[in-house]
Amino acid sequence: MAVYTQLGPQQVEAVLVHYDVGQLVALKGIAEGVENSNFFVQTTQSRFILTLYESRVNPDDLPFFYALLKHLHHAGCKVPRFMADREGQWLQTVAGRPACLIEFLDGVSVTEPTAAQANSTGAALGQMHQALADFTLSRPNSLGVAAWRPLAMRCTAAGLDSIADGLSARIFAECDFLEAHWPTGLPVAAIHADLFPDNVLMLGDQVSGLIDFYFACTEIRAYDLAVTHSAWCFSNDGAVFDADVSAALLSGYADCVPLDATTREALPILLRGACLRFLLTRCYDWINTPANALVTRKDPLAFLRRLDFYSDAGQVENMLGQYS
């Protein structure tokens, strides 16, 4: 979440007049995240998130996200609903951008997750994957393995090595490795693809909501577990691996979706791929984020450190052994 397009109370009131949600009481921009412009909206009846979709989100993908969340909500998963206005419309236009009013879920995002919270998150991810087994819509992964080398080339041309000496060569070497070893034959399904701690709401040790599905796509299902593991099991700077959080996350997931031998064998490659994906997009955002945007840039090197960890076969073998 972030704010690229500024909104005032009158603009938001003009949106709310189409809904049966009461009068505007409070409005605040949300700086976390990097994708869209997001605002906390409180009315006399309830609380919502107003999201304006910026250039990285293709408006043609919004029906997929809407259908995905509707499917998960009906399956009993804790996800926010898109709110419909009096005419049944869930997609609006605000400040010239596609926009949605979205249900607000109670809970907080943790910055230093405990093993118990990681276990609950692993279970929620597994439950989500179970619920999506019969979801029939698909959306290509625009940030999958085929996109990494072109993105690396764009970042290099824009000054990638200004972030760290030798970073470009390291990234292209990883592209070579992953393109040669990327697994095939694993189950493919709709996935979240971005389940960082700030996209999981907690009440104590229990998950109260999974949010921000705007990278959701059709991909190797276990890649979703790899993304979540890389996001949850390290210190924020990527320097310290938490074995207890790792074991709890994997155990919570496997209680819902058992990890067969083929998936376990592929997991080290998927983990490296998850790190490269976020290393690259963080590099791109670091170089290209406008100076006046109300958005918190995230350190790309935090995922280079994770990548170095997962590239050590002994470390990964020990990690999976602790889970077993």
Image (tube, helix red, strand yellow):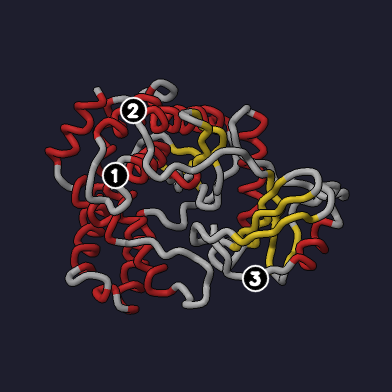
Query: What residue is rendered at 19% in x and 51% in y?
Result: 308
Farthest left residue in view: 314
Instruction: Tell which of 309 and 42 is nearer to you.
Output: 42
| Cβ–Cβ under 8 Å for marks 2 and 3 | no
Give left or right: position of 280 versus 133: left
Sequence order check: which comes first, mark 2 or mark 3?
Answer: 3
Instruction: Tell which of 187 and 48 is nearer to you.
Output: 48
Query: In the rendered structure, which amino acid carries the disc numbered 3?
Result: Gln
Sequence order check: which comes first, mark 1 or mark 3?
Answer: 3
Query: In the rendered structure, which amino acid carries the disc numbered 1?
Result: Phe
**68 over 77 or under it: above or below:** below
The disc at residue 321 is none
What element does badge 3 sit on? loop
The disc at residue 248 is 2
Residue 287 x %, y %: 38, 74
Instruction: Name the quarter where the C terminus is drawn.
Output: top left
What element does badge 2 sit on? helix
Query: Which residue corresponds to mark 1?
Result: 234
What element does badge 1 sit on? loop
Query: What residue is rendered at 61% in x and 55% in y?
Result: 61
Instruction: Name the quarter where the N terminus is drawn.
Output: bottom right
| Structural distance between the alpha carbons of marks 2 and 1 | 13 Å
The disc at residue 6 is 3
| Structural distance between the alpha carbons of marks 1 and 3 | 34 Å
Residue 67 x %, y %: 66, 43
Give the class, few, some or many, for how many residues have Cα within 10 Å of label 1's Cα (few <14, many ≥20): many
Give the class, few, some or many, for how many residues have Cα within 10 Å of label 3's Cα (few <14, many ≥20): some
Q: Is residue 60 visible?
A: yes
Give the class, few, some or many, for how many residues have Cα within 10 Å of label 2's Cα (few <14, many ≥20): many
User: Residue 70 occupies which quadrant of the picture?
Assistant: top right
Residue 137 x %, y %: 60, 42
User: Residue 112 occupies which quadrant of the picture?
Assistant: top left
